[in-house]
C-alpha cells in the first residue's frame, strides 16, 4: 500500500462566502463610509485653516521685510536685476493672495440648493420646526432613511472631492510663492 493523496479542493478549506451582504452589514458600512468622508472634510478644512494662517504670517513678514526692496525696485534709476526681484516679490504677494482665496473657498463652500428633501441634510432640518422634524423622521420608512443616508454619502463625497481640489490649489499657490520668494532673494544676492 502506497501513499495516496486525498483530493481536497480549495472550496472545502475556505468558508463559504455569501453573495449578498446582510442589511446590517450594508448599514454599518454606510455609516463607516459617512464617518470617513466627514473626517476627510474636516482634514481639508484644517489644511485650509493652516494654509491661511501660514499665508497671513508670510504676507506680514513680506510687507515688513521687503518693503524697501519693493520701493527701490520700481524707481527709474534701479538696476534691472533689482526690478526683476521686485516683480518676483509682487508675484509672491499675488500667489499668497490666490492661496488665501482658494483656502477660503475650501472653508466657505457655496452651498447649492438641493432639489430632493432629506431629513439628514442640516439645511432641510433647520427649515422644519422641532416637532415636525421629529415626527417626520420617526414616520419615515426605513427604506427612505437608508436612501437618504446613501444620498448624503454621495453628496458629501462630491463636497470632499471639491474641497480637496480647492485646498490642493491653495497649497500649490503657497509653494509657488515660496519658490518665487527664494528666486527674488537669489536675484538680490546676485545683484550685491
Image (cartoon, helix red, strand yellow):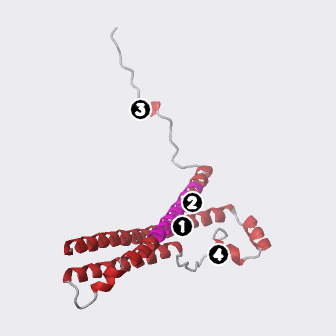
Q: Earlier in the sequence, mark 4 or mark 2?
A: 2
* Marks 4/2: CA–CA distance: 18 Å
Sequence-earlier tag: 1 or 2: 2
**Residue 109 in view here:** yes
Q: CA distance from mark 3 to mark 2?
A: 36 Å
Q: Are marks 1 and 2 in contact (CB under 8 Å)?
A: yes
Q: Which residue is mark 3?
A: 10
Residue at point 64%, 75% (across, down): 123
Could you classify mark 2 by the number of other residues whose Cα lies within 10 Å: few (under 14), some (14-19), or many (20 or more)?
some
State the residue position of label 4. Answer: 123
Residue at 34 percent of width and 8 percent of height: 1
59 in relation to 24, above or below:
below
How dense is the environment of label 3, judged by Cα within 10 Å: few (below 14), some, or many (20 and up)? few
Disc 4 is placed on an element classified as helix
- Residue 98 showing in the rendered view: no
The alpha-carbon separation of the residues under discs 1 and 4 comes to 14 Å
Residue extending furthest toward the right = 131
Residue highlighted by disc 2: 34
Amino acid at each position: 500500500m502506497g501513499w495516496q493523496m486525498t483530493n481536497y479542493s480549495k472550496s472545502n478549506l475556505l468558508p463559504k462566502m455569501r453573495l449578498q451582504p446582510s442589511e446590517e452589514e450594508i448599514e454599518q458600512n454606510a455609516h463607516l463610509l459617512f464617518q470617513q468622508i466627514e473626517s476627510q472634510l474636516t482634514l481639508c478644512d484644517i489644511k485650509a485653516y493652516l494654509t491661511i494662517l501660514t499665508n497671513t504670517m508670510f504676507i506680514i513678514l513680506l510687507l515688513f521685510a521687503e518693503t524697501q526692496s519693493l520701493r527701490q525696485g520700481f524707481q527709474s534709476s534701479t538696476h534691472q536685476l533689482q526690478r526683476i526681484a521686485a516683480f518676483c516679490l509682487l508675484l509672491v504677494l499675488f500667489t499668497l493672495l490666490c492661496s488665501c482665496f482658494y483656502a477660503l473657498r475650501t472653508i466657505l463652500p457655496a452651498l447649492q440648493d438641493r432639489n430632493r428633501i432629506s431629513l439628514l441634510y442640516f439645511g432641510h432640518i433647520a427649515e422644519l420646526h422641532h416637532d415636525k422634524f421629529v415626527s417626520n423622521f420617526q414616520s419615515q420608512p426605513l427604506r427612505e432613511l437608508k436612501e437618504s443616508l446613501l444620498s448624503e454619502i454621495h453628496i458629501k463625497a462630491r463636497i470632499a472631492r471639491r474641497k480637496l481640489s480647492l485646498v490642493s490649489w491653495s497649497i500649490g499657490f503657497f509653494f509657488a510663492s515660496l519658490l518665487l520668494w527664494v528666486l527674488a532673494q537669489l536675484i538680490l544676492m546676485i545683484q550685491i
